[in-house]
Amino acid sequence: MRLEVELGVRSYPIDIGSGTLAMLGERAAELRATRVLIVTNTTVGPLYLDRAVESLRKAMPNVPVEAVVLPDGECYKDLQHIQMILEAAGRVGLDRKSIMVALGGGVVGDMTGFAAGMWMRGIDFIQVPTTLLAQVDSSVGGKTGVNLPTGKNLIGLFHQPRAVLIDTDVLRTLPAREVSAGIAEIIKYGFLGDAAFVAELERDMQELRALDTHVVSRVVAHCCRMKAQIVREDEQENGVRAKLNLGHTFGHAIEKLTGFSTWLHGEAVGVGLVMAAMLSAELGHLNVTDVERVRRLVAASGLPTDICEGIAADDAWRAMLGDKKSVGGVVRFVVMHAVGNTAIESVPEDLVRRVMNAYGWH
Amino acid sequence: MRLEVELGVRSYPIDIGSGTLAMLGERAAELRATRVLIVTNTTVGPLYLDRAVESLRKAMPNVPVEAVVLPDGECYKDLQHIQMILEAAGRVGLDRKSIMVALGGGVVGDMTGFAAGMWMRGIDFIQVPTTLLAQVDSSVGGKTGVNLPTGKNLIGLFHQPRAVLIDTDVLRTLPAREVSAGIAEIIKYGFLGDAAFVAELERDMQELRALDTHVVSRVVAHCCRMKAQIVREDEQENGVRAKLNLGHTFGHAIEKLTGFSTWLHGEAVGVGLVMAAMLSAELGHLNVTDVERVRRLVAASGLPTDICEGIAADDAWRAMLGDKKSVGGVVRFVVMHAVGNTAIESVPEDLVRRVMNAYGWH
């Protein structure tokens, strides 16, 4: 199945289905790539790098193809490892018509896009997301970047890929923990703007966790369609796109305060969704049964619903002050007005602290 | 005097004249900056940082203003020192509505623009160029970036400033060597597209070197006007903008092979202009008297016309293969078809090598 992200001259296709990894060579050939640098990591490389290279070699026998293999994990999503990609680009001799390929999850995708966006002031890249999280969310929309010790995704670029290849077959090698982490972002799409999709997830959660082909394809396509629509409306996040941050203000604080190494991004977002629902209830927008619905769905997906070890409320509040949505010392949250209906609001510190305390952050 | 770089929503003014540094606060206030980070270096900081801060404090008494001071020199234009700026941004708590100010020469401007372009995926910045080179060339047009060991300006962004403040008074503290380096880029503008301007420079070179107020203002404005026009036609260098690279293919090779530390950028460009003229003669476009005219003007500006120590022809050729204009293993040069008339062409290796050998690169 093919979707299109419509962004004028920056439009690009998303191909979703079984075996789309084999289309990589074709896509690269369409871009007339002079050289290809595949960026992957130590987990994904051994599983899928050969197939990616084979597809490229077959479509473009005379084009040099090289790879750089990063260590696996959010804690390596930093400027030092961007430099590792850039040094590989220099060694391989990438020119302005060369391309990079992101073969991996959200970390690999964010880093490859960032490196491609700055190499010679911007070259093309293709996203081949291999985790559920990257397939439903991070590979689409052109947000790229890395973390700083100061905070999550503090530096980066808007740099759209030229194509996204979502091969649902590769999910078969994904550990259950990573599946659940991806489902956190899927749940987010429901609560941020689609009540019917929430009901669908409540119905199909077991099939989704079991990676039932039919359910996974439908869910991935649904999320990509929502994402493509939001990105089309607001590519550079001047408005509606910020809603995709539902659950992320709390989530990013968790990631930062645990050194980007204890919890997967999706796990932090899962807890963040529950806390955002609680905050929305504190604001009087949601009732207790709505909050419970969020918590139940997060729990049903296999995600932890309780993360508090090592998280002090003061530190968390400081982390939120440094969030990209905060301006002039005012912290802004995506809050739910109802299931499937969200808005971006500044929230008084005492309400946020009440939620943190109720959650065991002291 | 005010010029405008017309780029639709990214348009911005260039104010040129005596004392424009004092307008900094006003410009920052117009942008409604929530915080300001001034980026400067150990040479310029002691001379002008206080005045920049004073102007900002006066216009925006409640807005925090901080500074980060980089070491001075092209050899510090690297990713490590970008990280130094980004860490300062984190410490100071820059948010999406905060701004950076580049107070310095081309290196400071390129680095500040790059850091501003990636901080939270892009915040505003103001250029306050303090060298002649930055005033006539690098502060206008939004090219930002740093060097890699592999080559000059290999990573960067197109990120336009929101304002450029060119204070011709600050040139009074500029060492003669830096004045000559700036004149290299001025000469470039003449030969790349304006024969009358070449004649003007031949006539006024002594006044220009002496920083005669009248001549300097006229020359700076003329170059900025040419640059603004070229950038308007081709912001992202898909065509005509590459002509601004006249002299730079040889020049970048010199800089790289001498570790970005022996020669100023302008000095390398001066030699590059002479070599580009020789190459154009080899191609049959220029005659010997034209080449001599380039060499004489470069020499008259106080620039070295002979740089060969430590430069091997093979290394230089490899450096050129890694130049951003080279695609698919073909090296492209800006060549002169006549004084004031240039084109971008791929050139056979043996002609380039003949010029290098004639220049003493073996």
Image (spheres, coloured by chain):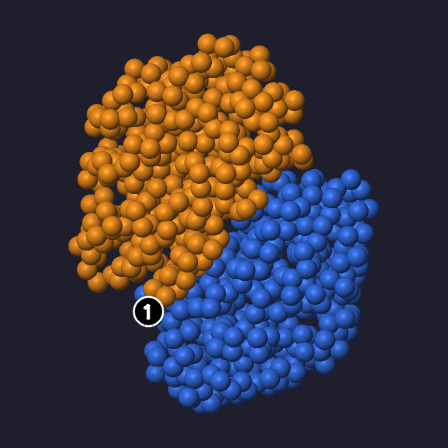
Chain colours: A orange, B blue
- Residue shown at the point (57%, 44%) measured from the top left: A150
Residue A271 in percent (x, y) is at 46, 26
- Residue B346 location (% of width, % of height): 37, 72
Quadrant of the frame with the N terminus of chain A: top left
The amino acid on which the numbered mark 1 sits, given as a three-letter code, is: Gly
Q: Chain of mark 1?
A: B
Q: Residue at x 31, y 50 (%)?
A: A42
| SS state under label 1 | loop
| Furthest residue toward front | A309
Q: Nearer the viewer, residue A90 or B187?
A: A90
Instruction: Say whether residue A159 is visible.
Output: no
B149 and B222: which is toward the camera:
B149
Few, some or many C-alpha atoms within 10 Å of disc 1 (few <14, some 14-19, many ≥20)? few
Which quadrant: the C terminus of chain A? top right
Horizontal side, residue B326 vs residue B176: left or right = left
Q: Position of residue B281 (x, y in %)?
A: 44, 83
Q: Is there any visible trace of residue B276 in the rendered image?
A: yes
- Quick check: B210 above or below A351? below
Where residue A209 sits, quadrant-wise, is: top left
User: Is residue A98 toward the left or the right of residue A313 in the image?
Assistant: left
User: Residue A65 at x, y = what percent?
Assistant: 27, 59
Question: At x 34% / y 29%, what residue is drawn?
Answer: A180
Total numbered circles: 1
Of B222 and A332, nearer the camera is: A332
| Residue for point 32% across, 45% down | A104
Q: Please name the residue that numbered disc 1 is placed on.
A: B329
